Amino acid sequence: MHDKTMIFSISDNRDESIKNILNTVYKALEEKGYNPINQIVGYILSEDPTYITTHKNARSLIRKIDRDDLLEVLLKSYLKS
């Protein structure tokens, strides 16, 4: 048996899920010929979903993420690199 307590972090799973969604949205925007960075920044600043294409269900995916959570994950990722 295990003598130590296992630590389970929901935050790590949430962050990974957000990263996966963001990568999917980025690729969908790129495939449709948009500048993904500009479109995602526009979405974050305005929370207007029309900045995100419906291609590959990207708009529905990004709307599943709370904007504060998205910013938190982006900031953590940026500061780690």
Image: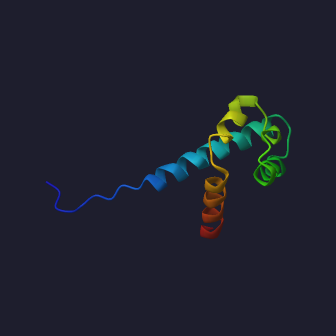
**Vertical placement of 37 versus 60: above or below?**
below
Percent across and percent down for residue 22 are 66, 46
How is the structure coloured here? rainbow
Percent across and percent down for residue 32 are 82, 34
Where the N terminus falls, by quadrant? bottom left
Q: Viewed as shown, does residue 8 lie left or right of 63? A: left
Residue nearer the viewer, 63 or 79: 63
Q: How many marks?
A: 0
> Which residue occupies the extreme left position in the image?
1
Percent across and percent down for residue 11 are 48, 55
Residue nearer the viewer, 48 or 59: 48
**Vertical placement of 60 versus 22: above or below?**
above
Residue 61 location, quadrant: top right
* Residue drawn where x is 59% and y is 68% of the image: 80
Q: Viewed as shown, does residue 78 lie left or right of 46? A: left
Percent across and percent down for residue 59 are 72, 36
* Residue drawn where x is 73% and y is 44% of the image: 26
Where the C terminus falls, by quadrant? bottom right
Residue 71 location, quadrant: bottom right
* Residue drawn where x is 36% and y is 55% of the image: 8
* Residue drawn where x is 72% and y is 40% of the image: 27
Residue 17 location, quadrant: top right
